[in-house]
Image (cartoon, grey):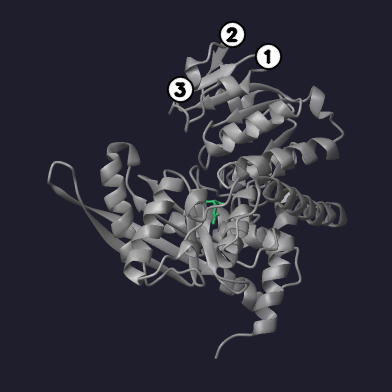
Amino acid sequence: MATNTLDDPEADDYSETESALETALRQLSAAATQVDVDEGVIERLKHPTRVVEVGVPLKRDDGSVEVYTGYRAQHDDVRGPYKGGLRFHPDVTAEECVGLSMWMTWKCAVMDLPFGGAKGGVVVNPKDLSTEEKERLTRRFAEEIRDTIGPKQDIPAPDMGTDAQTMAWFMDAYSMQEGETTPGVVTGKPPVIGGSKGREQAPGRSVAIIAREALRYYEKDIGEATVAVQGFGSVGANAARLLDDWGADVVAVSDVNGAAYDTTGLDTHAVPSHEEEPEAVMSYDAPNTLTNEEVLELDVDVVIPAAVGNVITADNADDVQADIVVEGANGPTTSAADKILEERGIPVIPDILANAGGVTVSYFEWLQDINRRQWSLERVHEELESMMLSAWDNVRTEVEARDASWRDAAYVVALERVGEAKSSRGLWP
Ligand code: GLU
């Protein structure tokens, strides 16, 4: 998987469309030059522990049978059980899952959570399935990967195309086969069956907290800040609404159909989120509209790509006019774009820090499941805030000490923690 180009962070022959794995490997190689971590450890971290591929047969509502492909990639578990989401998306590939699983390893390490990294998914467009079909697909997928996962082994969670209901079906299927209710096998469940209050809003909440800290760091008053958000799903909508509540002017939000744009600030609570009404951002009565892509080129204080990966590329990085990019989606910026933005002096606050609130509240949920005791929403918010601030501080310290980019600094924090754990455990046998 690792080629010479991927190993060389300075190589210029980036492909136009970079896979998540290529981006992740390039980022790892770039960060590896900044840390004092054994070369053998870095080499081990370039490879996942395992990638499980399964066939998932589904009886469609019309009686026909289709077989979908599912994956679970487990990158590293030196600091604790594998952890990461499951996506239902037509573009899921084994390679993408590996790249995303690496980011989960770093994300958990940046947050100092006792987890490693994993990611999985099924190659399917969930929009093509009825609710009943989605339930059957989820249950059969849970069964096919049952040996690979477990509350002490590997704990899935929601990601693109999956949600709390998917996790409820998944947990039920696993529990029925194991013969005992096992809430800790997944996180992101509905609170009534062991989910955590505040989990659904957590990734967006952390994006908002980090955007607020970034504004403070660059000496911009949040009350005078302008923000544009690409994607109005769980991450984008929650981030936009919180920043709006905290006084920022959210001037544009978008979905696949385009963006609502108001230079005086939108009423973000009145724009339907994807969960409230899918793909209905354009139903909001805004004075102006833009394309989904134009949102990334607005002259705002903060732009938040919170939809899908690979949206800021070599093709449009020169057109980004924002003062700060805060990554809400996983992997929205390719390595080539990262380099261009760095040269242009536009800081990019990376996904592995900014959207890490999701997995952090997943950790709280896992603790609540072990203890069979639910936390209040206030406690979730307080502990999330304090963990985000301490991760922000750790990363900021490296930015200042090394004059590094925010991404390299976050990688340094993560790699040092993972590297130390690997060195102290040693290589078996
Ligand atoms: N899918 C989310 C992410 O990319 C959350 C993973 C989790 O909670 O385990 O961070």
Across and down, in percent, residue 364 comes to: 63, 58
Residue depicted at x 63% and y 18%:
267
For disc 1, the marked residue is: 263
For disc 2, the marked residue is: 287
Residue depicted at x 77% and y 52%:
386
Placement of 198 over or under 79, stated as above or below: above
Chain-order first, disc 2 or disc 3 = 3
For disc 3, the marked residue is: 280
Label 1 Cα crowd, 10 Å radius (few <14 / some 14-19 / many 20+): some
Taking the image as shown, residue 265 lies to the left or right of residue 358, namely right
Return the mark for residue 120: none
> Hey, which quadrant is residue 220 in on the image?
top right
Gap between marks 1 and 3 measured at Cα: 20 Å
Q: Nearer the viewer, residue 241 or 393?
A: 241
Query: The residue under label 1 is which amino acid type?
Result: Thr
- State whether label 3 is within 8 Å of ligand 1: no
Residue depicted at x 77% and y 37%:
212
Query: The residue under label 2 is which amino acid type?
Result: Pro
Across and down, in percent, residue 332 comes to: 57, 42
Helix, strand or loop under label 1? loop
State whether residue 1 appears in this view.
no
- State whether label 1 is within 8 Å of ligand 1: no
- Quarter that holds the C terminus: bottom right
Residue depicted at x 60% and y 74%:
78
Q: Are marks 2 and 1 in contact (CB under 8 Å)?
A: yes
Chain-order first, disc 1 or disc 3 = 1
Across and down, in percent, residue 86 comes to: 44, 54
For discs 2 and 3, the disc positioned in front in the rendered view: 3
Gap between marks 2 and 1 measured at Cα: 9 Å
For discs 1 and 3, the disc positioned in front in the rendered view: 3
Query: The residue under label 3 is which amino acid type?
Result: Ala
